[in-house]
Image: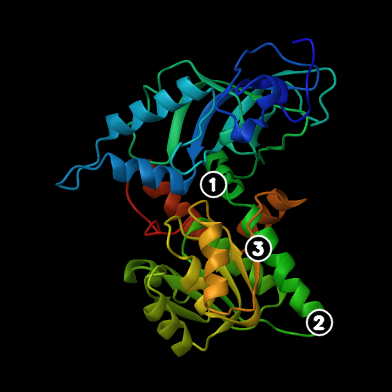
């Protein structure tokens, strides 16, 4: 490589020339293990597919009897990686994260990583050059967790975190996969508190990974009434008595009238709504449960931002709508702090990890 970009543009193979794009929107990336001066090569151990992407793949390869054809899921993921040089679901546009060990560090890398560090990448697989060497042969396609052997490349402007030694690495990965959500919720709620307010908060998908962390962050930041919305009673039972929410509501986040009625009965509308579900169709219902002058945070890769904007116009909703950015300075450390300090959050995550290892199902009914 004779020229390089800290944003990884030099890794883009398609499109090329004057049409070249950033890696996120590129059709295909260069996965060569030869590093530019500011790059880092990671030996991959585990891929963690994002919830929206895995749900789409799983539903696509589920037969009429409800049986999931895991081998077909695996084949499609492998095909995507081999075809695109990254894991970017062409339907959802999203990817996930990975765990691995630093194998080589370019002499100009600003990331502060050292050879031998075990890390989680905090940038999406949808923009990370990735090569798989083992055909994903250890993965049965039945969970978001993908054991893998291969290599990945981090750019000069990438983000990665060294895994803490006091936590199960896969538990850390689950937290870091959604660590942008609690950090942003803390910022939003703190903004209200600084104005002398104690905002009410509703979290759609409150029993999921990003949802439970968002509830914990809202409580810590000084939120008032907290309402968790979950799709099934099984998830409601996980939250009741946890202290994460004052009210737990069972409702379909895609059904505007039913959701609005359920949240109103729980004390709504609310000042802040956080969307943490991995299915489309929640954009306008979220607006309906948010008070005028309030804030909606869309923290889901299944969100149609056109539907959100047009929905707000059609409902005459005077709300601030925020895109859930996966990066906020210090977001990984903060999310891990919440996990360590909140037994209810930790219990939810450990149950989910145990279920994924055993291919069970805990708090995955539409929650990220």
- The residue indicated by pointer 2 is 195
Q: Mark 1 and mark 2: span between their CA atoms?
A: 33 Å
Name the secondary structure under disc 2.
Answer: loop
Numbered disc in front, either 1 or 3: 3
Left or right? Give the position of 154 relative to 170. Answer: right
Question: Horizontal and vertical percent for residue 190?
Answer: 76, 72
Q: Nearer the viewer, mark 3 or mark 2?
A: 3
Which of 178/8 is in front?
Answer: 8
Nearest the camera: 202 or 168? 202
- Does the CB distance between marks 1 and 2 fall below 8 Å? no
**In this view of the protein, which residue sits in the foreground, 138 or 296?**
296
Residue mark closest to the camera, 1 vs 2: 2
Task: Name the secondary structure under disc 1.
Answer: helix
In the picture of the structure, the residue carrying the numbered disc 1 is 174
Residue 244 visible? The answer is no
Judge the density around disc 1: few (<14), some (14-19), many (≥20) Cα neighbours within 10 Å: many
Secondary structure under the numbered disc 3 in the rendered image: strand
Write the residue at 72% across / 14% down: 35
Q: Earlier in the sequence, mark 1 or mark 2?
A: 1
| Depicted 276 relative to depicted 264: above or below | above
Asked if the residue under mark 3 is in contact with the one under mark 1, i.e. CB atoms within 8 Å, the reply is: no
């Amino acid at each position: 490589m004779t020229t390089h970009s800290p944003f990884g543009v030099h890794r883009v193979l398609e499109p090329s020339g004057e049409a070249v794009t950033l890696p996120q929107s590129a059709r295909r990336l260069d996965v060569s293990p030869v590093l530019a001066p500011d790059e880092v090569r990671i030996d991959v151990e585990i891929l963690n597919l994002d919830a929206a992407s895995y749900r789409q793949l799983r539903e696509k390869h589920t037969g009429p009897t409800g049986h999931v054809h895991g081998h077909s899921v695996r084949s499609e993921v492998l095909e995507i990686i081999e075809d695109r040089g990254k894991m970017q679901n062409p339907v959802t546009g999203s990817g996930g994260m990975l765990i691995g060990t630093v194998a080589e560090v370019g002499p100009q890398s600003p990331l502060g990583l050292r050879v031998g560090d075990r890390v989680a990448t905090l940038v999406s697989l949808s923009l990370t050059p990735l090569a798989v060497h083992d055909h994903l042969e250890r993965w049965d396609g039945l969970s978001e967790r993908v054991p893998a052997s291969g290599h990945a490349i981090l750019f000069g402007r990438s983000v990665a975190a060294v895994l803490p030694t006091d936590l199960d690495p896969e538990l850390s990965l689950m937290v870091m996969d959604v660590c942008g959500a609690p950090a942003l919720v803390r910022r939003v709620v703190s903004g209200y508190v600084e104005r002398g307010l104690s905002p009410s908060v509703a979290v759609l998908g409150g029993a999921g990974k990003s949802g439970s962390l968002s509830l914990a962050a809202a409580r810590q930041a000084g939120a008032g009434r907290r309402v968790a919305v979950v799709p099934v009673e099984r998830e409601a039972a996980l939250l009741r008595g946890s202290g994460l929410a004052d009210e737990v509501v069972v409702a379909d986040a895609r059904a505007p009238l039913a959701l609005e009625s359920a949240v109103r009965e729980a004390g709504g509308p609310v000042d802040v709504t956080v969307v943490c579900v991995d299915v489309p169709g929640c954009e306008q219902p979220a607006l309906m449960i948010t008070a005028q002058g309030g804030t909606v945070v869309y923290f889901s890769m299944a969100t149609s931002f056109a539907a959100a904007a047009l929905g707000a116009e059609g409902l005459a909703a005077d709300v601030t709508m925020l895109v859930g950015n996966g990066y906020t300075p210090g977001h990984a450390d903060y999310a891990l702090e919440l996990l360590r300090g909140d037994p209810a959050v930790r219990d939810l995550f450990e149950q989910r990890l145990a279920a994924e290892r055993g291919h069970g199902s805990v708090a995955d009914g539409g929650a990220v």
